[in-house]
Image (cartoon, coloured by chain):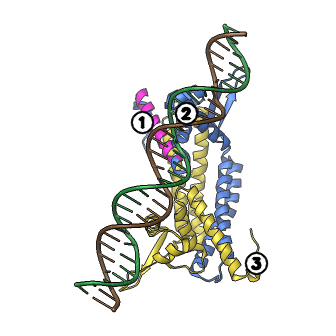
Chain colours: A yellow, B blue, C green, D brown
DNA sequence: TTCTTAGTTCGGTACTAAACGAACTTAAAA
DNA sequence: TTTTAAGTTCGTTTAGTACCGAACTAAGAA
């Protein structure tokens, strides 16, 4: 973790580092099966001090074509990762990060875990020998996931009641 | 969740369903950036009643070329998702699922969460205005993740002490 | 009405990755 | 020693994807 050196950093230095984080976000998104540009847009909207960008500003900032921007923005919007504001009587859209409630993050996590748990249960239901090594292994995992899923709900309640 | 209908299922029916689960695993792995075949091999080793396959059996069962099998198996091994047994004085390898301890699953999860948390902290450290909407949003997320990470350790201890 | 702004859609290119077959390798069996 | 079994490596084909530029569209401005 880098130390908080912001006070001894020139503005240019800060921007350089921010751009590095944008690239990093590009790679993170690539790993998750999105395109590089898609991730860069997410990075741009997340790390820069300017937190609202128009279509043209995104095109210019990331040096991409309008078609690429259009495509990537639609993907991000479909996934509810970004949103945009409009102003009455203007066609311009102001894109920004979708700042969801942090409880949504937990629910998301919860659902993904539940999904893999269900897959394993389906596998178990089809095992001829419920005591086979894999069956034992899978039941072990399923049991643990169920424990954590239950506790998740409690923790969520605890966290949101105290804050 | 499907009902436990195994007792009213013919053996062929069961195998048909198992093969469907193999395909599903293929798609799950694809989503995570692996190849389709890689996922099918994982599915094969996980869902079928036969839980150990030789190279040739995998080739035959999935109808893939030997080169494809060789490549995919090396990837899975490198990621510690499968392993194989050998028998003294025989070249054949018997592949099977790597049945890791379920605590490894939690640790994995823990590390991934920590990583994204660190990314957000890096972004926060570079914000000119620590009260900007995105900064507030990110701090909110970071705080929540930290809460859950701490509790994770407690839950892990609780789970493994009682079982 | 015509022009400009703010995008979208379409078609093509270039790159990447999956999978294959054939040739090669290495070790045990005969 | 030759053959067979068990894979590996290499080069190619094929399929898919990312991105671009150019042409198009739709709505507000002049």
Q: Residues within 10 Å of mark 1 (few under 14, many from 20)?
A: few
**Is disc 2 placed on a helix, strand or loop?**
loop
How far apart in space, not on screen, are marks 3 and 1 (Cα)? 62 Å
Image vertical order of residue A39 relative to residue B106, above or below? below
Image x and y of residue A129, in percent: 54, 30
Q: Element type at marker 1?
A: loop
**Subunit that carries the residue with mark 2:** A
Residue at the disc numbered 3: A5
Q: Which residues are magenta?
A: B11-29
Which residue corresponds to the image point at 66% horizontal and 53% vertical from the top-left? B108
Asked whether the viewer can see residue A46, the reply is yes
Which numbered mark, 3 or 1, is in the foreground of this view? 3
Q: Nearer the viewer, residue B140 or A156?
A: B140
> Residue A28 placed where, x, y %?
60, 60
Q: To which residue does mark 1 refer?
A: B5
**Which disc is residue A130 wearing?**
2
Query: Is residue B89 a member of the stretch shown in magenta?
Result: no
Spatial CA distance of label 1 from label 2 is 14 Å
Determine the chain carrying the residue at label 3.
Answer: A
Left or right relative to A66: residue B106: right
């Amino acid at each position: 973790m880098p130390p908080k050196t912001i006070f001894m950093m020139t503005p240019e230095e800060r921007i350089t580092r921010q751009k590095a984080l944008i690239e990093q976000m590009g790679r993170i998104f690539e790993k998750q099966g999105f395109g590089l540009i898609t991730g860069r847009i997410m990075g741009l909207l997340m790390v820069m001090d300017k937190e609202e960008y128009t279509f043209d500003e995104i095109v210019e900032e990331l040096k991409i074509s309008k078609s690429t921007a259009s495509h990537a923005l639609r993907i991000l919007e479909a996934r509810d990762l970004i949103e945009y504001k409009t102003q009455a009587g203007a066609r311009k859209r102001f894109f920004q990060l979708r700042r969801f409630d942090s409880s949504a993050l937990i629910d998301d996590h919860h659902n993904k875990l539940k999904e893999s748990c269900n897959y394993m249960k389906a596998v178990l239901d089809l095992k001829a020998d419920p005591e086979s090594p894999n069956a034992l292994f899978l039941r072990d995992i399923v049991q643990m996931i169920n424990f954590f899923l239950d506790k998740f709900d409690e923790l969520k309640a605890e966290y949101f009641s105290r804050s």
